[in-house]
Amino acid sequence: MSEFKDFDEALAEDAEVKITFKVGGRNYEAPTSLPAKVVLAQLKLSNDSGGIDQKNIGEWLAAVMGEEQFDQMLNDGISWIQLEKVLVFLLVQYGIIPDPEEVPEEGGEEEDPK
């Protein structure tokens, strides 16, 4: 007995929700879940530690946001620091890295008694 699963329905629901942010006076959108094309690009661009080298940030962001939005940010004069912050924000939103602004609670691990 086989069961039918409609993956398009779940994807349509995800497509309605967007990750939004503002930089340079403009609002931008990114998909709620990473398209397979982006994940494959990330795998290609990943360095030995699994991160994205600075030289590849633009290519990854363009894959996530789309070339048009990425080019708009560049044409508006986004700074390198802002671009890195956008990258970190998106990586956190997608669960790729932990939020660097969240401070772990102290005393989370107990030391062995001596």
Image (spheres, grey):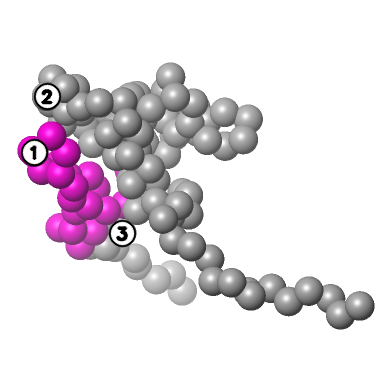
Question: In this view of the protein, can residue 15 be seen by the observer?
Answer: no
Q: 97 and 100: which one is in front?
A: 100
Q: Where is residue 59 in the image (x, y as percent from the top left)?
A: 34, 24
In the picture, the quarter occupied by the C terminus is bottom right
Mark 1 → mark 3, Cα distance in angstroms: 33 Å
State left or right for residue 89 relative to residue 12.
Answer: right
Residue matched to label 1: 26
- Element marked by disc 3: helix
Residue matched to label 3: 7
Up/down of 62 relative to 9, above or below: above
Which numbered disc, 3 or 2, marks the residue that appears first in the sequence?
A: 3
Q: In which quarter of the image is residue 83?
A: top left
- Element marked by disc 1: strand
Single out the mark in the foreground, 1 or 3.
1
At 22% from the left edge and 52% from the top edge, which residue is drawn? 19
Residue matched to label 2: 76
Kind of residue sitting beneath label 3? Phe
- Element marked by disc 2: loop
Q: Position of residue 103 (x, y in %)?
A: 48, 62
- Residue 68 among magenta residues: no
Mark 3 → mark 2, Cα distance in angstroms: 38 Å
Q: 83 and 58: which one is in front?
A: 83
At 64% from the left edge and 75% from the top edge, which residue is drawn? 107
Mark 2 → mark 1, Cα distance in angstroms: 9 Å
Question: In this view of the protein, can residue 90 be seen by the observer?
Answer: yes
Up/down of 3 relative to 32, above or below: below
Q: Position of residue 108 (x, y in %)?
A: 63, 74
Kind of residue sitting beneath label 2? Asp
Answer whether labels 3 and 2 touch (C-beta < 8 Å).
no
Q: Where does the magenta region start and end?
A: 13-35
